[in-house]
Image (spheres, rainbow, N blue to C red):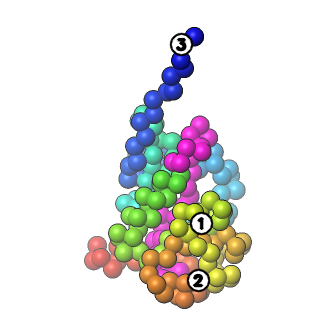
Amino acid sequence: MAPQLSPKHDLVYLIEDASHDDVIELINAEAFGPGRHTRAAARIREQGPHDRSLSFVCADDGETIASVRMTPVMAGSVKGHLLGPLAVRPSHKNRGIGRELVRIAVEAARRRGSEAVILVGDPPYYMPLGFEKVAYGALAFPGPVDPARVLVVPMTADVHDRLKGTICWHDWDTSSMGA
């Protein structure tokens, strides 16, 4: 009996561009369904555009199979980024693709000068990736959110102290760079 060969996978991580919009919408619809637009984090994303230069896709042999987006925000007095949505096609789940997209996006935000990367997500998934819980009820979202799922990667020593107040879209990284 001949040995079974594994299919070859050429995973490539790329900066998102406009040509990815339709497939990213499909991937997010598969992952989160129609209710995704009513979530508190989605309400923030509706306030302004995400930052394509900090948003990434993963392609397998030329097919886009995963994405993560980053949206510039002010969270209390912290200039940060809201991570998400993060989604991977069902055919490619449990291969570390989502974790790698998070790692790439967080490092890109750190290089940009972000003080924190914030998200609403599952602590068991995100905490091993460097996220920490935000103080219970410290951030006011534009809609209901489970405070136990609000997480942050702090990039300066005083982030937790300043994560108090409203979180909203704010294009701080473009305006502060003179663009």
Q: Residues within 10 Å of mark 3 (few under 14, many from 20)?
A: few
Q: Left of 148 or right of it: where is 8? A: left
Label of residue 2 in the image: 3
Q: Earlier in the sequence, mark 2 or mark 3?
A: 3
Looking at the rendered structure, the secondary structure element under dot 1 is helix
Q: Residues within 10 Å of mark 1 (few under 14, many from 20)?
A: some
Of badges 2 and 3, the one in the foreground is 3
Q: Earlier in the sequence, mark 3 or mark 1?
A: 3
Of badges 3 and 1, the one in the foreground is 3
Looking at the rendered structure, the secondary structure element under dot 3 is loop
Q: Left of 88 or right of it: where is 56? A: left
Give the position of the N terminus as an image quadrant: top right
User: Is residue 178 magenta-colored?
Assistant: no
User: Is residue 69 magenta-colored?
Assistant: yes
Question: What residue is drawn where x is 36% and y is 75%?
Answer: 113
Label of residue 166 in the image: 2
Magenta residues span 68-97
Looking at the rendered structure, the secondary structure element under dot 2 is strand
